[in-house]
Image: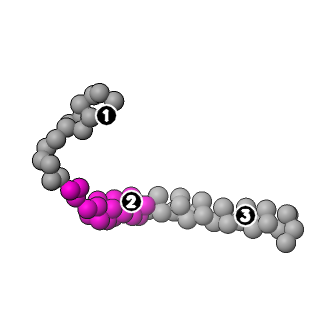
Amino acid sequence: MSVVVMLMIFGWSTCFAMIGFCALKDSGKLLKIRRSMALWLDNSLTPADDSAGNERLVRGGANIQ
C-alpha cells in the first residue's frame, strides 16, 4: 500500500472518530460513559490488605497518613 493511500485512510478514520466523539460529547452520552467506567473501575478495585492496622507509610522520611 502506498504512503498516499495510508495517509488517506488515516485521515478519513481520524475524521470519523472526531465526528463520533463530538456527537457523543454534545449528546451527553460521553459523560454517562465516563461515569459508568469510573464506577466500574472503582468497584473492581480490591481493598488493600491492611493486616497491620492503621500504620503510617514512610516515604523519604515524611509520614503520610
Q: Quadrant of residue 36?
A: bottom left
Tell me which amino acid carries mark 2: Arg
In the image: residue 35, left or right of residue 56: right
Q: Secondary structure at mark 3?
A: helix
Give how far apart the Cα atoms at labels 3 and 1 are. 46 Å
Number of numbered callouts drawn: 3
Residue positioned 75% across, 68% down in the render: 9
Q: Is residue 47 magenta?
A: yes
Closest to the observer: 52 or 13?
A: 52
Question: Which residues, given as a range, are shown in magenta?
Answer: 28-49
Q: Residues within 10 Å of mark 3 (few under 14, many from 20)?
A: few
The N terminus lies in quadrant: bottom right
In the image: residue 9, left or right of residue 64: right
Tell me which amino acid carries mark 3: Phe
Residue positioned 60% across, 59% down in the render: 18
User: Circle 2 is placed at which residue position?
Assistant: 34
Q: Nearer the viewer, mark 1 or mark 2?
A: 1
User: Circle 3 is placed at which residue position?
Assistant: 10
Residue positioned 79% across, 66% down in the render: 6
By secondary structure, the bulk of the magenta-drawn segment is best described as helix
User: Circle 1 is placed at which residue position?
Assistant: 59
Across and down, in percent, residue 37 comes to: 36, 63
